[in-house]
Structure formats: C-alpha cells, structure tokens
C-alpha cells in the first residue's frame, strides 16, 4: 500500500521559559512523529496577540512539512508534542495564555475542514501578522484556499499592527 503524501504548513509559537529550545525541541518531535521538514522560516519575535500588553513576547516560526498523516492523526500528534513539551490543556476558556509551545495547523494541502475539533485553514491566520510574516518568508505565493489570495497579498491587507521582527538567535 502506498501512503499518500500531504503538504502541510504549521506555525510554532512559544513565550515561556527558553523559547528557542521549546521551538527546537518541538521541531525534533515534529520531524520524528509527523514528517519531513521541507522548509522552516527564520525566528520571528512578536508581541502577544490578543493578550495583556505586559505578556512576554513570543518566538514564532513557520514550517512546511511533508506527511502521511491524515488531518485528525496530525492534530493528535500535535497535541502529544505540545503535552510532551509542557503545554497545559489547549482548550481552557479563560482566553489566551502563556505557553511553552503552541503548534497550529495553518494549511493541509488545499483542503477546507470545518468541524467541532478542527478547522483548516486556520480560521484566524489572515488576521495575525505574527503568522503571516513567517509564512510569507517560506511560501509567499501559496494561495489561500478560501480567500483565493496569496499569503503575500493577505499580508499586504492585514490590519494587525503588532510589532514583529525577524531575529537571529
């Protein structure tokens, strides 16, 4: 049986403890448990989105990965990795919280999923400069399957004014 290959794009984020180590440790687990890393963006530092202004800044990075996992299995592996790195329950209702690691599925091939446990493309992606800039670095001409705009075009239309900077660490 030949397993079908899928191209996925993930966004890593961390604002707790050693942010770089959290991203690197999760990258290793992603490579071992999800698939081959084809591309990774630079590190980007950003203010926390929709959180208290005094919240410690996030490091973010976008990844392009080739996987054989279906969307639900991918989501489960991501939750396992987040839990292993130290992430508490992702579904707390008090709003956004500091986290050792957050891994979001931005795109899975060009499919669109709306379910109670998973939405692809990520429903807030187009509103978040901290996600758009790293994605634009690795795939500026990728087309968003719902909006039919490229990542670069969406970035140009984004109203998010939070400070984002590429960093060398």
Image (cartoon, rainbow, N blue to C red):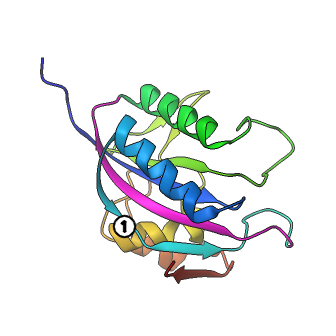
Q: Is residue 64 above or below residue 161?
A: above
Counting from the top left corner in percent of width and height, residue 153 is at: 42, 74
Residue at 77% x, 55% y: name it. 98
Question: Which secondary structure type mostly characterizes the magenta part of the structure?
Answer: strand
Where are the magenta residues, as a range? Answer: 54-69
Find out whether residue 105 is within the magenta segment: no
Residue 8 lies left or right of residue 155; in this view the side is: left
Q: Which image quadrant for residue 42?
A: bottom left
Q: Quadrant of the N terminus?
A: top left
Find out whether residue 56 is within the magenta segment: yes
Q: Residue at the top extreme?
A: 1
In the image, 77 versus 8, the foreground residue is 77
Number of marks present in the image shown: 1
In the image, 131 versus 31, the foreground residue is 31
Is residue 26 in sight in this rendering?
yes
Q: Which image quadrant for residue 131?
A: bottom right
Residue 81 lies left or right of residue 1; in this view the side is: right
Counting from the top left corner in percent of width and height, residue 117 is at: 59, 28
Is residue 122 in sight in this rendering?
no
Residue 21 lies left or right of residue 33; in this view the side is: right
**Pointer 1 local density, CA inside 10 Å: few below 14, some 14–19, many at least 20:** some
Q: Which image quadrant for residue 49?
A: bottom right
Residue at 82% x, 67% y: name it. 55
Counting from the top left corner in percent of width and height, residue 37 is at: 31, 52
Counting from the top left corner in percent of width and height, residue 24 is at: 48, 57
Q: Which residue is label 1 attached to?
A: 150
In the image, 29 versus 153, the foreground residue is 29
């Amino acid at each position: 049986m030949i397993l079908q290959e899928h191209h996925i794009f993930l966004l890593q984020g961390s604002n707790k403890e050693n942010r770089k180590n959290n991203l690197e440790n999760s990258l290793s687990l992603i490579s071992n448990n999800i698939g081959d890393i084809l591309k990774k963006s630079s590190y980007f530092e950003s203010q926390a989105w929709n959180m208290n202004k005094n919240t410690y800044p996030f490091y973010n990075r976008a990844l392009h990965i080739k996987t054989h996992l279906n969307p639900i299995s991918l989501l489960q592996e991501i939750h396992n990795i987040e839990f292993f790195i130290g992430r508490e329950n992702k579904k707390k209702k008090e709003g956004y919280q500091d986290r050792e690691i957050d891994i979001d599925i931005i795109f899975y091939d060009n499919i669109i999923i709306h379910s109670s446990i998973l939405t692809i493309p990520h429903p807030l992606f187009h509103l978040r400069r901290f996600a758009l800039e790293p994605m634009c670095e690795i795939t500026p001409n990728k087309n968003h399957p719902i909006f039919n705009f490229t990542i670069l075009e969406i970035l140009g239309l984004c109203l998010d004014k939070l400070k984002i900077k590429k960093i060398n660490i």
